[in-house]
Image: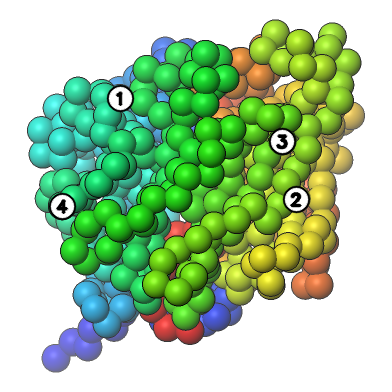
Amino acid sequence: MPTWKPDPTFYPSARMAGGAPKETLAYVASFDPTRQTPDALDVIDLDPASPRYASIVNRVSMPNVGDELHHFGWNACSSCLCPNAPHPHSERRYLVVPGLRSSRIHILDTKPDPRRPQIVRVLEPAEVAERAGYTRPHTVHCGPEGIYVVSLANAEGEAPGGIFLMDHETFDIRGQWEIDRGPQQLAYDGWWHLGYDTLVTSEWGLPATFENGLVPEVLLGGQYGHRLHFWDLHSRKHKQVIDFGAENQLVFELRPAHNPTRAYGFVNSVISLKDLSASIWTWYREGDTWAARKVIEIPAEPADPDLLPPMLKSFGAVPPLVTDIALSLDDRFLYVSCWGTGDLKQYDVSDPHSPKLTGSVRIGGIAARATHPKADGRRLNGGPQMVEVSRDGSRVYFTNSLYGAIDEQFYPDGVDGWMVKLDTSPSGGLSFDEKFFIEWPETHRPHQIRLEGGDASSDSYCYP
């Protein structure tokens, strides 16, 4: 009689996952900003012993054009070992890859050959809208009950955005997740504290306010998202809202502590209308409710207006534009992407209320155009954007494109795509892997990264 064993990439705790084998492949969502050729999932060789290290070894093209692949995720992860809804015999096998612009969802099977994923199902936009009641699928997280997909708009492309669930084996859409959404209208990211039966969501804006670029009037009017929402994970009802204030625009990436006994997490606000700074906030449990406070503020940098895009000339400064963050599995280091200035910063967040800067590198940037050791001294555009951390915390990977229409607003000469790897020091500190600088084909730009076997933002854990 066969013996079923859990997927070997599932771990009960983040501490155990930190000892997992090193990743040898990455999957990167790549899109054509002109929408003339199909977007693709690119496969990257991460094995330093391989002759093809730091190169694209395969490209899986999507069947249509204009998807704008953005964020994607695994069908199953370590949350399958949680006691409240266990699925220990599921596999981390399929990648769920939505098109943010098209609302089309692609399912790719990585099992037969991880270097050559195959598209096995495509959910067309009409099916997504009809069955989910939502469009513009943005964030994909595997959870105990299935695949959670945070979407930015309803079936008509308007408010409210929200979450729908997919079956993690058939990929059928089950339907809208919320029972009572309370005041929530805008959506962006969603994640949870499984040990506290709490789901958290953040806010961006509706398609009309970003698909053709950020709208200055909406931004300066403080009308993009600036709130966190807290939900009862199992009753699916809205419980609390925390407003960061309209000056703190674009409340984006949620990074809860990986240890399920720790009731806190981090979120970034991209830009302050007061002084163009960016900020990191910690949310935390305070009695029977949730609270949040700003723990990091990164100021704008003065710059020659001649070096700035039209959108920023009158300010004479470069905003850091913190567009992504990542938290190491040991909950010790927070990595912060400053897409505007070109910095990737590392903070020791052992005390989540008192972060300490421990490392920083600069590459690209609106005014700096900093180079890379392997780039032959060329001035680079774009900046650190989507960031991912290996399970052992030793390696950090990032790409340089934010969103097609927004790239051109801040980098009018366009963004030439690249991907970079950093090595970390156990006590803090960052350095470039001088051999790892991947330049993308001119037709495409790279966005989110997923690592083979899981990474620091792919899994949830139920045991400390």
Relative to 278, is 308 above or below? above
* Mark 1 vs mark 4: in front: 4
Q: Nearer the viewer, residue 17 or 181?
A: 181
Q: Which mark is residue 102?
A: 1
- Which residue is at 31% across, 70% downward? 197
Binning the other alpha carbons within 10 Å of mark 3 as few (below 14), some (14 to 19) or many (20 upward) gives many
Residue 416, position as x, y percentages in the image:
66, 23
Residue 271, position as x, y percentages in the image:
63, 33
* Mark 3 vs mark 1: in front: 3
Residue 161, position as x, y percentages in the image:
29, 36
- Which residue is at 67% across, 65% downward? 353
Name which residue type carries label 3.
Ser
Name which residue type carries label 2.
Lys
Q: Which residue is mark 4?
A: 179
Mark 1 vs 2, N-terminal side: 1
Name which residue type carries label 4.
Ile
Please tell me whether mark 3 sits on a helix, a strand or a loop: loop
Q: Which mark is residue 345?
A: 2
